[in-house]
Image (cartoon, rainbow, N blue to C red):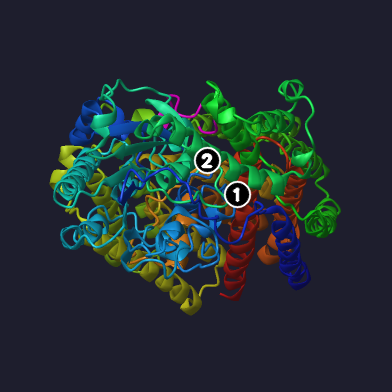
């Protein structure tokens, strides 16, 4: 055992080294100017003196503008002309930190910010030294006073810039109330003091409700009404300041991103990228009429004019007469030009164009090539068109022409488009070093798997073909988005191969088992429709989520808990008296059931009244916290008892220890699963039971075949539970079970378990099957030897080859249109599979279980 396990344990750090080299070269940075924009001596006069920037996290456009919205006051401002509405298109990844960067500096964020977004204590994303519309307030001759209340991401990005502040942790998604009350409690004091120039308010409740219950949660209308009341308070303040101090206040309401139909974000779907944006001020109605509001709901989530989210930056800068930040690629919003004369409008747009041209010169050396015929260039490439337009803009008396504003906007939009997709500064040498390291170690791993001592040539051939096809598929964006279909096909093909083999062996029982596994596969593939093409289409999970099927859903949940009870009673507490065994098995299962029911009631899910009447449940953050802790404590006690009772037992039974550890772990996995997904564990249990029986059939299977089946079921279960290769499907609804305050390590573990519950289940199921095969085959090989030689070698080979394929695809396709929306998220998931699922679960956890089983 030791040599094989050590080889893999030693290879993993070396492969991680190669991955780090690749990451340093691949995760790029955009060319940035350091320092600050030059002060413009003849800028148009300011329209606003003060700015209130109210960011409501995950405020999707329809939450404000549709006829289903409860934000009636905000809608009245739009109708009366005191507010201008827009849909702001957020660039992926649609998570908070990169979006705040975009809305303050106007620059395109680094994809790595999506990872740094989860690190509350990380300071590597600080924007000190970079220009932003906030810093421009500080650069005034009389420095502006800035205050901030809300998400402490602002404090991480702008350390030391705020004169008064109070930050809140953004990742504790179980909190809908206090996280916003901690912001609002400062408002009365600050509105009375009124000594500030910029007030930043970042509310998190809408985002948290989305993660826990989705956009249509029963808590969402109430929360949106709360936000609407705050907007009314701020607008009344703006009216009062205008009347008493003759100062104009600009109120900006916006979302950093939206959310998809299950309440998550991070990807590039219509709901995730469509954020609401409203500019409001009491002076606006003097310069134009209102817009109809509310509007009918639309699946595109596009209401009014659609702008790029970075356009917020030059628009705020222009309205307060500050220079445009150095790295801004935003374009001043046309509807806001109404506050100036035509000459000032041209002056403002020219300043925007000159600022953006400085970035173009930095990014493209050919941009300054002399132009002899501007008109001829307008039919060429984007760079040629920009050169031609700039030549026109530089002509004498251009500002006096009728088309000058249209020409400036054409130049600005084209420049923005070009700079938004500008190839990042990849370090190809470091990427190639990483690729070479991973290539060599993948070759070693693949060679060890194919040339192992196992004589099962059929399984090796199927594995080699599957790995090859999977690797090739990583080079197609659509194939990456719809990867689940590869695994459904591979599972079907593998089960069919096994059917043919057992038919030749005339094994009827094995044939029935394999056919039943095909039925289970069919159920799993229709449980969740994930990916892109059919995402959101009707599936089993959607049906079980309806009010009509609520009873059926909870019947399945009850069935799963009965299975848990039976397995605990039989495999963990069978050596104690029947009464004690019943109590010890019943207590953790009932504790878990009441916890999951309380979570469902708290999330406004439909729970049959009969169950609520006979089950002690309670809702509220504190009650759920205590129930989660009770469940985890009961599970921990079960595991401790199981280990000690096995060690102290006079009967040496490693098989029983493995089975008991597996079923106790399943308790924890169910605790970390959404209620609508708990019935899928009934299917998992059936697949495990059938696979266990197949492993017990003489000559029906081999250790290598068991491991390949385990690898396939891991991936099938991952996609069947609603996951995909998009960051938007990361489920945070169970990430805070039993956690009273934010802890990156604890929340990270719980998030991983809740999203990888299926793969973890089948990892441990594979060990159980290997132990059964050992007992049936009467082999002298130990479970440890079988697992490390056949199991880990195959699993490690697959994940190494998968990592190599995805890294190669990211290298070859680094200029692809979907590099940051498809291939980079896939790279992140592949790293998760490689480090956490393979490195921690398949290697460390499983080795610990088989080692302990050998000791007892």
The span from disc 2 to disc 1 (Cα, nearest Å) is 20 Å
Residue at 74 percent of width and 30 percent of height:
384
Q: Is residue 430 left or right of residue 519?
A: right
Q: In this view, does 126 lie to the left or right of 201?
A: right
Q: Position of residue 609 (x, y in %)?
A: 16, 38
**Pointer 2 local density, CA inside 10 Å: few below 14, some 14–19, many at least 20:** many
Residue 691 visible to the viewer: yes
Is 536 within the magenta? yes
Q: Mark 2 points at which residue?
A: 91
**Pointer 1 local density, CA inside 10 Å: few below 14, some 14–19, many at least 20:** some
**Viewer-side residue, 168 vs 420:** 420
Is 139 within the magenta? no
Residue at 25 percent of width and 55 percent of height:
180
* Label 2 vs 1, first from the N-terminus: 2
**Viewer-side residue, 36 vs 591:** 36
Q: Nearer the viewer, mark 2 or mark 1?
A: 2
**Viewer-side residue, 426 vs 625:** 426
**Which residues are drawn in magenta?**
530-541
Q: Label for residue 829?
A: 1
Q: Where is residue 554 in the image (x, y as percent from the top left)?
A: 29, 39
Magenta portion: prevailing SS class: loop
Q: Where is residue 475 in the image (x, y as percent from the top left)?
A: 74, 37
Helix, strand or loop for disc 2: loop
């Amino acid at each position: 055992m030791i040599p094989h396990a050590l080889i893999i344990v030693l290879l993993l750090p070396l492969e991680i080294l190669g991955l780090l080299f690749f990451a340093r070269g691949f995760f790029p940075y955009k060319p940035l100017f350091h320092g600050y924009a030059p002060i413009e001596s003849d800028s148009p006069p300011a329209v606003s003196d003060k700015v209130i920037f109210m960011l409501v996290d995950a405020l999707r456009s329809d939450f404000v503008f549709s006829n289903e919205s409860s934000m009636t006051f905000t809608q009245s401002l739009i109708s009366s002309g005191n507010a201008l509405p827009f849909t702001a298109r957020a660039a992926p990844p649609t998570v908070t930190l990169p979006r705040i960067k975009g809305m303050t500096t106007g620059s395109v964020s680094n994809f790595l910010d999506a990872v740094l977004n989860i690190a509350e204590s990380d300071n590597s994303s600080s924007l000190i030294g970079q220009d932003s519309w906030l810093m421009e307030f500080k650069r005034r001759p009389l420095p502006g006073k800035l205050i901030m209340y809300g998400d402490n991401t602002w404090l991480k990005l702008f350390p030391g810039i705020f004169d008064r502040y109070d930050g809140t942790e953004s990742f504790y998604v179980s909190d809908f109330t206090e996280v916003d009350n901690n912001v609002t409690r400062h408002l009365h004091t600050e509105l009375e003091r009124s000594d500030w120039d910029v007030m930043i308010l970042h509310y998190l409740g809408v985002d948290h409700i989305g993660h826990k219950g989705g956009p249509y949660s029963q808590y969402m209308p109430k929360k949106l009404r709360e936000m609407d009341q705050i907007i009314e308070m701020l607008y009344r303040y703006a009216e009062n300041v205008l009347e008493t101090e003759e100062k104009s206040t600009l109120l900006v309401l916006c979302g950093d991103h939206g959310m998809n139909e299950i309440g998550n974000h991070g990807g590039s779907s219509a709901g995730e990228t469509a954020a609401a944006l409203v500019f409001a001020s009491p002076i606006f109605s003097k310069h134009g009429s209102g817009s109809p509001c509310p509007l009918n709901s639309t699946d595109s989530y596009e209401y009014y004019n659609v702008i790029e989210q970075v356009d917020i930056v030059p628009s705020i800068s222009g309205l307060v007469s500050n220079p445009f930040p150095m790295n801004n690629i935003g374009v001043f919003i046309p509807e806001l030009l109404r506050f100036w004369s035509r000459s000032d409008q041209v002056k403002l747009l020219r300043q925007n164009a000159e600022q953006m041209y400085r970035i173009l010169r930095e990014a493209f050396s050919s941009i300054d090539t002399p132009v002899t015929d501007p008109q001829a260039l307008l039919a060429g490439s984007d760079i040629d068109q920009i050169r031609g337009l700039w030549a026109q803009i530089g002509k004498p008396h251009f500002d006096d022409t009728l088309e000058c504003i249209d020409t400036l906007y054409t130049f600005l939009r084209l420049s923005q488009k070009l700079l938004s997709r500008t190839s990042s500064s990849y370090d190809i040498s470091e990427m190639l070093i990483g690729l070479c390291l991973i290539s060599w170690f993948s070759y070693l791993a693949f060679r060890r798997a194919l040339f192992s001592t196992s004589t099962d040539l059929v399984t090796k051939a199927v594995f080699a073909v599957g790995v090859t096809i999977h690797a090739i598929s990583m080079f197609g964006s659509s194939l990456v988005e719809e990867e689940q279909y590869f695994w459904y096909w591979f599972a079907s093909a593998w089960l069919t191969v096994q059917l043919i083999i057992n038919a030749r062996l005339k094994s009827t029982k094995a044939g029935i088992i394999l056919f039943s596994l095909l039925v289970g596969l069919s159920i799993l593939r229709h449980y969740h429709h994930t990916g892109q093409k059919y995402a959101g289409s009707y599936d089993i999970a959607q049906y079980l989520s309806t009010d009509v099927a609520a009873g059926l859903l909870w019947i399945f949940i009850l069935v799963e808990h009965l299975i848990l009870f039976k397995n605990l009673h039989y495999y963990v507490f069978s050596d104690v008296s029947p009464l004690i065994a019943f109590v010890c098995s019943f207590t953790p299962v009932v504790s878990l059931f009441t916890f999951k029911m309380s979570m469902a009631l708290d999330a406004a899910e439909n729970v049959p009244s009969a169950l609520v009447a006979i089950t002690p449940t309670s809702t509220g953050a504190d009650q759920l916290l205590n129930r989660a802790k009770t469940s985890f404590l009961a599970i921990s006690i079960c595991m401790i008892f199981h280990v000690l009772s096995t060690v102290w037992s006079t009967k040496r039974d490693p098989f029983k220890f493995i089975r008991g550890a597996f079923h106790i772990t399943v308790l924890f996995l169910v605790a970390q699963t959404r209620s609508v997904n708990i019935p899928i564990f009934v299917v998992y249990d059936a697949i495990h039971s059938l696979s266990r029986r197949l492993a017990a059939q003489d000559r029906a299977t081999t250790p290598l075949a068991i491991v390949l089946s385990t690898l396939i079921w891991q991936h099938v279960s991952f996609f069947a539970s609603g996951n995909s290769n998009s960051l938007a499907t990361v489920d945070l609804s169970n990430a805070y079970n039993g956690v009273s305050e934010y802890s990156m390590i604890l929340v990270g573990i719980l998030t991983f378990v809740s999203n990888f519950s299926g793969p973890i289940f089948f990892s441990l199921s594979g060990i159980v099957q290997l132990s059964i095969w050992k007992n049936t085959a009467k082999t002298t090989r130990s479970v440890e030897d079988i697992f490390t030689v056949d199991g880990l070698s195959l699993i490690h080979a697959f994940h190494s080859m998968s990592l190599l394929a995805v890294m190669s695809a990211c290298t070859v396709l680094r200029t692809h249109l979907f590099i940051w929306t498809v291939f980079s998220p896939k790279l992140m998931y592949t790293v998760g599979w490689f480090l956490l699922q393979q490195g921690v679960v398949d290697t460390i956890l499983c080795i610990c279980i088989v080692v302990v089983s050998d000791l007892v």
